[in-house]
Amino acid sequence: MPSSRPHIDIQEHHLRIGSVDTVTLAQEFGTPLYVTDEQRLRENFRTFAGAFPGADIYYAAKANWNLSVLRILASEGAGADVFSDGELYVALLAGIPAERILFNGNSKTRHELQMAIDAGVRVSVDSIDELHALSELAEESGRIVDIAFRVNPDVSPDTHPKIATGLATSKFGIGYKDVLQAYEVAKELSGVNPVGIHCHIGSQILDVSPFGEAVGKMMDLVEQITRLEIDLEFVDLGGGLGIPYQEDLKAPTPADLADMILPIFEERSSAIGISPRLVLEPGRYIVGDTGILLTGVNTVKRSAKNFVGVDAGLNLLIRQAMYDAYHEVVVANKADLMMEELYDVVGPICESGDIVAKERMLPAIEPGDVIAVLDSGAYGFSMSSQYNGRVRCTEILVNDGRVDVVRKREDYGDLIAKNVMPARLLSA
Ligand code: LLP
């Protein structure tokens, strides 16, 4: 196993995670099965936080909002970037303190704004319409809400177009040239108190230079906003640090990111004569490599290609279909056997795009084998669905040989739980 994944190893041909045999897990709990390694999760958080001493790390809950994952991160001192009422609900429930939560989102409902006000979290305001709605609601509630504006910094990271968020044409944030005016408006409005500034340029970014460009542009704004006599308490540069999904991908480390950001941030802050806190919102880096998806082989079909039909598809991991994402796959019960044949590993979903892994050399595969899809901890379960009437699978947490279920497998009842049958259809 690659050294970049120290929590994963092989023993007696079996893949292990957190010193737990994945084949035994598959037998005991059935497949599909998501497995998360607690120690790796803690380690990733500590590595990231350690690279930015004094900064606040707001974990991006969208990457994986399992309650236990959030609870573990809360115990490590994480704050949270939440993007919806539901994520806010779960983050608070997990024990993340309200003062370390930033409510993001480009199209928040009034209900969501009210929930943010009631919870006492800060809000990253994405538009002038939202600013007015928030001001009105806060006033009605007799509260003053601390806000940041989400800035569209017009920075282009080299990543998949679907996960670049800071381009001028992206739907997120206030246009760079309109930001100052937004602060001027906010300053005069009641119920809102501008205390921060926020951006996020994209995700799975493997070259840190766009972060340098973004922090420079953000500090230009900070300088002008300070001249408006607004005291900025924090500068939030979002998330986006990529991880090495492929062995030959050289991904920057949090230390590389810090080397790019911190000198500019510190130098510019002291030149302006202020000392705002730095906030970062990593998601993928914290959870990506902590999780694997175990999926059982139903069939091996040899036609134009060798198709391995497994029991998990885009219903449980949509990244390949949505972003042409690459995830390494390992035959968990033959983890160190010779690679013999070229296979397409395909899911059970009625979509031609439901391909787990394309054209991979793997040991000879037969029904009953178990395939592990690596680096599935970020945007895996959190983007899952019940498409094709498939229940979501069990989620397991492992920690140095210990095994706990952290989300039970759904059942058929969950598929129809919120359906309501009009009485007239029953009697027909
Ligand atoms: N902050 C904000 C405001 C964000 O929108 C995001 C991600 C993050 C932080 C965390 O970014 P990260 O460190 O995880 O790159 N589903 C896609 C990724 C979408 C990311 C959306 N925003 C994927 O599976 O690749």
Image (spheres, helix red, strand yellow):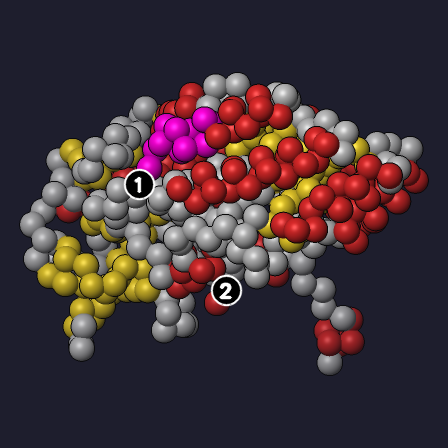
State yes or no: residue 376 in magenta: no
Across the whole image, how many numbered discs are drawn on residues? 2
* Front in this rendered view, residue 239 or 377: 239
Q: Is residue 287 above or below residue 38?
A: below
Q: What is the secondary structure assignment of the residue under circle 2?
A: helix
Which dot, 2 or 1, sits closer to the camera? Answer: 1
Mark 1 residue type = Ala
Numbered mark located on residue 387 in the image: 2
* Front in this rendered view, residue 313 or 393: 313
How would you rate the neighbour count of disc 1 (Cα within 10 Å): few for under 14, some for 14-19, many for 20 or more?
some
Q: Which residue is mark 1?
A: 251
List x then y, in percent, for residue 113: 77, 44
List x then y, in percent, for residue 348: 36, 65
Instruction: Name the residue rendered at 49%, 33% in the picture.
Output: 69
Left or right: 184 as drawn, with respect to 322: right
| Image quarter of the N terminus | top left
Q: What is the secondary structure assignment of the residue under circle 1?
A: loop
| Image quarter of the C terminus | bottom right
Q: Is residue 212 above or below residue 412?
A: above
List x then y, in percent, for residue 252: 33, 37
* Front in this rendered view, residue 403 or 173: 173
Distance of label 2 from label 1 (alpha carbons):
33 Å
Furthest residue in direction top, as rendered? 54
Q: Is residue 371 above or below residue 6?
A: below
- Magenta residues span 251-263
Ligand 1 is within 8 Å of the C-beta of the residue at disc 2: no
Instruction: Name the residue rendered at 27%, 59% in the picture.
Output: 357
List x then y, in percent, for residue 311: 35, 59
